[in-house]
């Protein structure tokens, strides 16, 4: 504000000094001064008052050596020398101080030449001469050199560009004359009148501004130089484009010029990699380092492409750029409609794209939308600064992506869950947009049989019409890899190195594919069982092949049942759940099976199931009996004819009566008919009928008798209460009839022999379990079994468990010898966990007797 105040004070001083012109006075200044005495106040002109000090008179000359001159209360001059002679008053020397009410700074006015006040022809005072420019008295008595042409900052508009205003000042009868210079070139002139009003005429042309040329002209006027009026009528134009940044230019418009600078209303051009956006801009320009621009609206007549074919379309532009001391800040944004997209290829796109012009370049922002091959999608926010320069540069923006609400499906049965984090990259190469997607995560999947979790890696790339995707996965014992096409067809190959079927490992490989869009998923598994797998004694898988339909692992092959003589070949097929669980349905293909020496199976009708549950084989087969031969017992009885009806055999390794031996048990059921022909007395015959149940255990080629029972007996058609039940081991044969030899614990097992045709021997198990009791001491069970007589007893403790169904599972088994009263006690140190239990007691060391149970609970 210092130069402005200089101009104000100088103008006011001139106004005061010259204000008397044209005003009539009763006496001339000379006459008034001649009549003055020491200390008198003499008005020399309107607003000019002299206080006389050091007054002396010599003839017609009056002198005041150290007068005080007051200029209308604006300034005061001290030690002014005044001489009055021949009708003229001359003021020389002195130092004038501006009144403190006008400025908070200490200004002085030096008298460079005499000021002469004389009486004009009309009697009015006339002033001639001049004052020097204002000087600022700095603190510490430092005085700045006064400039004869001070700057102007407020009454005039801001100087354009990097130039500075300079003034040339002078006095005349109208007031203060001003020459306005821009640098060394005069661009205007003006006048500050004695009453404080002012007017300047300005005209600047072809001033350089950021590469354009600026021209402006007009008048600046006001009523009071101390209170400059707003500048409103300076107008001009901008020729050419002002380059604000590498990608933003404004120009070819109009301007208005005021104290803040040049206010622009111009065209704006926002350059795109190809094409650009045209809009309007308004703002203020002071210098190349000081400016501000706001941009609104916008059209793209030439298109605005960020890549080949990737046109933003209709845009809305909004934003501001500003430069302070050459540092540019702010940005200008161009946004599209919510449904606008930039295609990336294969239905992938950048949604609602926008551009932001900054000093560092053009920033592209958008939302990535990437459909996944098997449903769902991936989304991400993309932000990248495009390279400078025209044309499509190469760039790449890595972003963090997220699977949408429906996850991201890779292929059928393999998907990343909703919210999964993935890595994506949007790129431009040679003007072509594209996207890459990568993922690496552990996923639950049934894609490969017997496996349910894989470390999966996905790599997907899409650009234009090109699409490629690969997927791979690994887990201990298995791996897969494949490719996916843009039409959702795919092919995946897998390998399994630890496939296990009942403790036997098998190498397998396969293929999962969809060969046409919308078609079914086809699965192929190549795996064969080439080694013999023993499921149980007398039962083997001889050969099998595996299959997989995408949900179930299936097996088909040949199972052989070994008999005492010959075998039965069975066609088997079923499902494999995992290495420890499978189910087989079997059906006989051919038969040549004899059990012992008395039963020939009708193997052609044999069928059933073989189940592996947690590596425990369960066998349930059923067949007809082609023939059943019992010993010929007619040596002493005259003759006995035996007939069988509805003869069936069930084969199982499930010991329903508590048997735990690893063997096959055959149960033969038939309707037995015995016709006895008498050879003595009057002769005749008798018919005995009943339901026969015969149990045999099969160990390889050896069959062992377990039990025989005949119930529902009819004697010559008359019902009886008679029943026959025999249990034991066949010991020896006596041809003359049945001989029952009790078997005791400790009998050597190798004395057992096969039943020979015509020879039958059986041992009865006479002891029976009468009762079972249980006591608990600190969760340790104490079991007491009461038998009908002294014998061994087999005691089992089982626990009830419910997982995929409820079942009794064996906890422990002991054989205990009863005392002479038939009492057997079992104690154990094993502590039982909380749950439901039962005791199963069977007479005999082999546990073949009828079971008696007792349930108890451990809390």
Image (spheres, helix red, strand yellow):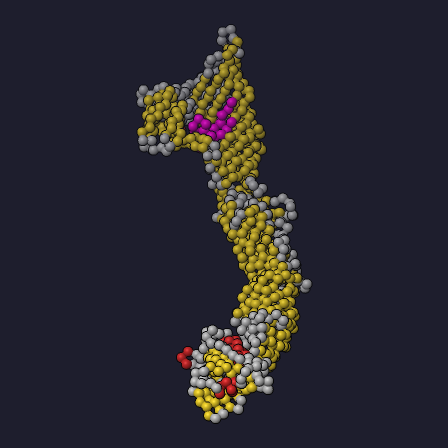
Q: Is residue 646 left or right of residue 280?
A: left
Q: How many marks?
A: 0
Q: Is residue 691 magenta?
A: no
- Residue toward you, 293 or 7: 7
Q: Position of residue 410 (x, y in %)?
A: 57, 49
Residue under the image location 54 percent in, 22 percent down = 647
Q: Position of residue 106 (x, y in %)?
A: 45, 77
Q: Position of residue 76 (x, y in %)?
A: 47, 80
Residue 345 lies in quadrant: bottom right
Residue under the image location 55 percent in, 50 percent down = 403
Residue 767 in the image: above or below residue 831: above
Q: Is residue 654 magenta?
A: yes
- Residue toward you, 472 or 764: 472
Can residue 668 be seen here? The reply is yes
Residue under the image location 51 percent in, 43 percent down = 450
Residue 552 in the image: above or below residue 854: below
Residue under the image location 54 percent in, 24 percent down = 648
Q: In which quadrant will I find the C terminus?
A: top left
Q: Which residues are magenta?
A: 650-669
Residue 413 lies in quadrant: top right
Looking at the image, the residue that sits furthest to the bottom is: 59
Q: Position of residue 405 (x, y in %)?
A: 55, 47
Residue 583 in the image: above or below residue 772: below
Can residue 495 be seen here? The reply is no
- Residue toward you, 851 or 113: 113
Looking at the image, the residue that sits furthest to the right is: 301
- Residue toward you, 34 or 504: 34
């Amino acid at each position: 504000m210092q130069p402005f105040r200089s101009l104000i004070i100088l103008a006011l001083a001139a106004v005061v000094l010259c204000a008397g012109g044209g005003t009539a006075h009763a006496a001339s200044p000379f006459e008034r001064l001649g009549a003055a005495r020491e200390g008198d106040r003499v008005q020399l002109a309107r607003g000019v008052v002299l206080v006389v000090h050091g007054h002396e008179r010599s003839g017609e000359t009056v002198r005041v050596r150290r007068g005080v001159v007051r200029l209308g209360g604006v300034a005061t001059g001290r030690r002014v020398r005044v001489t009055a002679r021949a009708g003229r008053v001359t003021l020389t020397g002195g130092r004038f101080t501006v009144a403190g009410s006008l400025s908070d700074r200490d200004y002085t006015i030096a008298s460079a030449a005499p000021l002469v006040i004389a009486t004009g022809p009309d009697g009015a005072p006339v002033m001639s001469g001049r004052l020097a420019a204002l000087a600022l008295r700095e603190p510490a008595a430092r005085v700045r050199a006064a400039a004869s042409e001070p700057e102007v900052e407020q009454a005039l508009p801001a100087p354009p560009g990097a130039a500075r205003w300079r003034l040339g000042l002078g006095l005349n009868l109208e007031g203060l004359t001003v020459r306005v210079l821009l640098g060394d070139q005069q661009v205007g002139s003006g006048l500050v009148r004695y009453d404080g009003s002012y007017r300047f005429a300005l005209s600047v042309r072809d001033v350089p501004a950021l590469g354009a040329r600026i021209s402006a002209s007009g008048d600046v006027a006001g009523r009071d130089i101390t209170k400059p009026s707003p500048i409103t009528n300076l107008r001009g134009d901008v020729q050419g484009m002002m380059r604000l940044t590498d990608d933003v230019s404004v120009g070819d418009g109009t301007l208005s010029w005021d104290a803040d600078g040049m206010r622009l209303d111009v065209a704006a051009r926002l350059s795109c990699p190809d094409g650009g956006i045209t809009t309007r801009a308004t703002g203020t320009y002071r210098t190349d380092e000081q400016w501000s621009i706001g941009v609104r609206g916008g059209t793209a007549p030439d298109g605005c492409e960020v890549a080949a074919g990737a046109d933003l379309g209709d845009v809305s532009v909004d934003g501001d750029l500003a430069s302070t001391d050459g540092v540019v800040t702010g940005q200008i944004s161009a946004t599209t409609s919510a449904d606008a997209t930039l295609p990336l290829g294969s239905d992938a796109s950048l949604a609602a794209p926008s551009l932001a012009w900054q000093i560092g370049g053009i920033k592209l922002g958008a939302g990535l939308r990437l459909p996944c091959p098997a449903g769902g999608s991936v989304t991400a926010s993309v932000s990248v600064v495009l390279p400078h320069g025209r044309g499509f540069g190469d760039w790449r923006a890595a972003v963090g992506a997220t699977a949408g609400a429906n996850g991201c499906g890779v292929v059928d049965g393999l998907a990343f869950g909703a919210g999964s984090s993935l890595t994506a990259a949007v790129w431009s190469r040679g003007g072509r947009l594209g996207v890459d997607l990568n993922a690496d995560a552990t996923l639950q999947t049934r894609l490969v049989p017997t496996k349910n979790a894989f470390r999966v890696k996905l790599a997907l790339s899409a650009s234009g019409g090109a699409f490629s995707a690969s997927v791979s996965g690994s887990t201990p014992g298995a791996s897969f890899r494949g490719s996916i096409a843009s039409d959702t067809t795919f092919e995946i190959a897998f390998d399994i190195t630890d496939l296990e079927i009942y403790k036997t490992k098998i190498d397998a490989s396969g293929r999962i594919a969809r060969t046409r869009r919308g078609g079914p998923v086809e699965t192929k598994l190549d795996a064969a069982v080439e080694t013999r797998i023993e499921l149980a004694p007398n039962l083997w898988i001889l050969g099998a092949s595996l299959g997989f339909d995408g949900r179930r692992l299936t097996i088909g092959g040949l199972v052989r049942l070994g008999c005492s003589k010959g075998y039965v070949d069975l066609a088997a097929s079923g499902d494999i759940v995992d290495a420890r669980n499978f189910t087989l349905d079997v059906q006989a293909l051919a038969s040549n099976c004899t059990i012992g020496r008395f039963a020939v199976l009708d193997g052609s009708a044999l069928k059933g199931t073989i189940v592996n549950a947690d590596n425990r084989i369960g066998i349930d087969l059923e067949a007809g009996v082609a023939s059943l031969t019992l010993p010929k017992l007619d040596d002493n009885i005259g003759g006995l004819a035996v007939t069988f009806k509805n003869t069936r055999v069930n084969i199982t390794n499930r010991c329903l009566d508590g048997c735990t031996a690893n063997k096959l048990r055959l149960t033969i059921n038939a309707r037995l008919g015995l016709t006895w022909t008498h050879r003595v007395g009057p002769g005749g015959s008798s018919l005995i009928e009943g339901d026969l149940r015969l149990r045999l255990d099969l160990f390889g080629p050896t069959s062992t008798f377990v039990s025989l029972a005949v119930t529902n007996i009819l004697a010559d058609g008359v019902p009886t209460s008679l029943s026959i039940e025999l249990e034991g081991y066949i010991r020896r044969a006596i041809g003359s009839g049945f001989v029952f030899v009790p078997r005791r614990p400790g009998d050597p097992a190798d004395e057992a022999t096969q039943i020979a045709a015509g020879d039958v021997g059986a041992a009865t198990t006479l002891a029976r379990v009468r009762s079972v009791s249980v006591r608990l001491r600190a969760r340790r069970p104490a079991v007491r079994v009461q038998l009908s007589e002294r014998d061994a007893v087999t005691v089992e403790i089982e626990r009830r468990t419910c997982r995929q169904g409820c079942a009794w599972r064996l906890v422990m088994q002991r054989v205990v010898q009863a005392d002479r009263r038939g009492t057997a006690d079992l104690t154990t140190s094993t502590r039982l966990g909380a749950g439901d239990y039962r005791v199963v007691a069977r007479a005999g060391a082999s546990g073949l007797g009828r079971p008696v149970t007792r349930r108890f609970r451990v809390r």
